[in-house]
Image (cartoon, grey):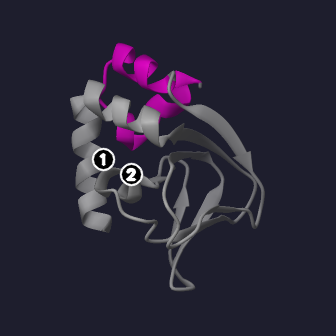
Amino acid sequence: MDQQALQATALFEGMSEAEVEESAAAFEPKRVFMGEELTREGDFGYSFFVVLSGRVRVEIGGESVAELEAGDHFGEVALVNGDKRNATVKALETSELAKIMTWDFQELLETNPTLAGRLKAVAQERA
């Protein structure tokens, strides 16, 4: 995964190049197309995403609650809290994402306290 793409997001802001480089190694690039469903409310969560380009819509109970764009992220609530997905996320247009699976996500949190603190705070707020 291109570390510069991740470093440009607020989630990785202020982190050292070494921290971002180590984190980027755990992510894989993912291209999605308009209408593609990335997460489904009520499903088990196995991945976390960072939006690098494009836009996605967050829906809860079939209602649109947010649109996310480059620099935003989603999927952390299920992984941090061990809950099922609290929202469905669909691509509004072709989008480039960085994706990390749960087992790598947990290791990332253990090795990067700055990132862990940020993601845990967001998960608590969004839960």
Q: Residues within 10 Å of mark 2 (few under 14, many from 20)?
A: many
- x%, y% of residue 94? 75, 54
Which of discs 2 and 1 lies nearer the camera? The answer is 2
Residue 14 magenta-highlighted: yes
The N terminus appears in which quarter of the rendering?
Answer: top right
Helix, strand or loop at mark 1: helix
Q: Is residue 84 visible in this depiction of the protein? A: yes
- x%, y% of residue 50? 51, 45
- Please state the extent of the stretch shown in magenta in the rendering: 2-24
Report whether 91 appears left or right of 61: right
Instruction: Say which mark, if any, is on residue 79.
Output: 2
* Residue 110 versus residue 124 in the image, above or below: above
Q: Amino acid at mark 2?
A: Leu
| Main secondary structure along the magenta-highlighted residues | helix
Residue at image x 41%, y 37%?
A: 105
**Quarter location, residue 114:** top left
- x%, y% of residue 8? 47, 34
Q: Which of the two labelled residues, at mark 2 and mark 1, occupies the earlier sequence position?
A: 2
Report whether 12 appears left or right of 91: left
How far apart, in angstroms, are the residues tagged by discs 2 and 1? 10 Å
